[in-house]
Image: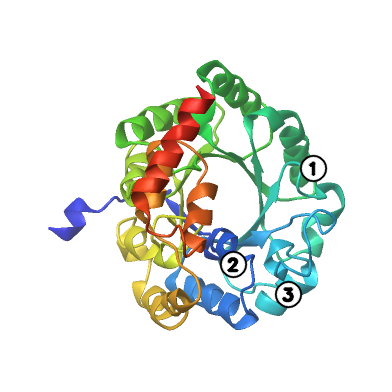
């Protein structure tokens, strides 16, 4: 009976982005022990990819206030994973306008990384295409992560997807940056992305946020409709409301392929103990920013301030007031 309800397909591959997305909560101040624990759990569980952080610019972001996983220099990567003798593939994310990608992304033979994920907004498509070409020419598998897709006009989205089809990128990722996407919207977007990607033998991925408590459901919806690259984090650890929980996803996608015990061990001994210092999850403030299709920065700020945390009515009024002012 259980297997009957599992989402099973030979091409599904799961990517863990616990360190990269989770680092947005604590400025990537994860200990080496913590990163190794997440890496070892993913390796033991049989997870396909692990995103170990960003390669953001040290000229734009402070090395004093941000941990090394914000920058992922090669010596730090090797301190954590050596040359990655395992089967898991390692990735880093580079942001348009925030990364010195020409110099910081080394040729593949000089790095333990396997994939570069290029993150960009719609107005950054020109730089994104250059970043994709650069990473591909250096020997990496490349993913295109168009952020905040729910704010992109239809004709602009079609134009971007058409241009990505002509690029050497391997994967188009549906990124629900604000946790706004409903199941119906995810179905629509997945069909659109898959139509473009399949026409040129590329794949579709999904990166969901849990503001509306739909990250898991949206990920399974996308998988059912043809998305094959699926993001998750252990314990849902991630910015604001968090992400699709790995322990749920890996138990539903090709469940016989993944061993959940190492994931739960990491959750128990490393991830959930972080709640003593930092918080994440679908608190009401994040529900509201998700419902209004806006960045969760206001909710993050409200949760950090003891004077505004859990003051849901005033947060709602302020959010609605800002929305009216924009209109």
- Is residue 318 depicted above or below 17 in this figure? above
Mark 2 residue element? helix
Disc number placed over residue 134 in the picture, else none: 1
Question: Mark 2 touching mark 1, by CB under 8 A?
Answer: no
Work out whether residue 290 can be spotted. no
Q: Position of residue 172 (x, y in %)?
A: 55, 37
Quarter of image, res 73: bottom right
Disc number placed over residue 266 in the picture, else none: none
Disc number placed over residue 26 in the picture, else none: 2
- Is residue 288 depicted above or below 50 in this figure? above
Q: Position of residue 320 (x, y in %)?
A: 42, 34
Mark 3 residue element? helix
Residue at image x 42%, y 62%? 236
Left or right of 88 in this view: 256: left
Left or right of 67 in this view: 235: left
Quarter of image, res 242: bottom left
Considering only order in the chain, which callout, 3 or 2, is on the residue closer to the N terminus? 2
Question: Mark 2 touching mark 3, by CB under 8 A?
Answer: no
Residue at which label 3 appears: 78
Query: Real-space Cα distance between discs 2 and 1?
Result: 30 Å
> In this orientation, which residue lies closer to the viewer: 305 or 42?
305
Mark 1 residue element? helix
- Label 2 vs label 3, nearer the camera: 2
Q: Position of residue 22 (x, y in %)?
A: 54, 63
């Amino acid at each position: 009976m259980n297997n009957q309800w599992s989402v099973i397909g030979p091409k599904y591959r799961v990517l863990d982005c616990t360190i990269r997305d989770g680092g947005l909560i604590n400025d990537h101040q994860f200990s080496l022990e913590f990163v190794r624990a997440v890496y070892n759990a993913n390796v033991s569980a049989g997870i396909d990819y692990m995103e170990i952080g960003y390669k953001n610019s040290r000229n734009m972001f402070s090395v004093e206030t941000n941990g090394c996983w914000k920058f992922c220099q090669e010596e730090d990567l090797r301190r954590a994973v050596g040359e990655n003798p395992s089967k898991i593939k390692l990735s880093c994310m580079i942001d348009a306008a925030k990364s010195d990608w020409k110099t910081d992304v080394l040729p593949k033979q000089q790095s333990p990384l396997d994939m570069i994920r290029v993150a960009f907004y719609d107005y950054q498509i020109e730089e994104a295409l250059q970043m994709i070409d650069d990473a591909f020419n250096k020997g990496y598998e490349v993913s295109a992560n168009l952020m905040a897709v729910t704010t992109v006009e239809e004709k602009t989205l079609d134009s971007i997807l058409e241009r990505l089809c002509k690029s050497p990128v391997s994967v188009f990722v549906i990124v629900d940056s604000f946790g706004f996407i409903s199941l119906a919207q995810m179905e629509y977007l997945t069909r659109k992305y898959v139509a473009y990607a399949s026409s040129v033998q590329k794949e579709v991925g999904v990166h969901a946020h849990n503001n509306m408590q739909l990250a898991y459901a949206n990920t399974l919806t996308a998988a059912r409709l043809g998305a094959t690259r699926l993001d998750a984090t252990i314990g849902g650890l991630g910015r604001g409301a968090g992400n699709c929980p790995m322990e749920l996803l890996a138990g539903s996608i090709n469940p016989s392929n993944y061993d959940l015990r190492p994931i739960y061990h990491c959750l128990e001994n490393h991830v959930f103990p972080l709640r003593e210092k930092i918080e994440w999850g679908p608190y009401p403030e994040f529900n509201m920013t998700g419902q209004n299709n806006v960045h969760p920065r206001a909710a993050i700020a409200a949760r950090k301030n003891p004077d505004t945390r859990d003051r849901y009515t005033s947060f709602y009024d302020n959010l609605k007031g800002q929305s009216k002012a924009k209109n």
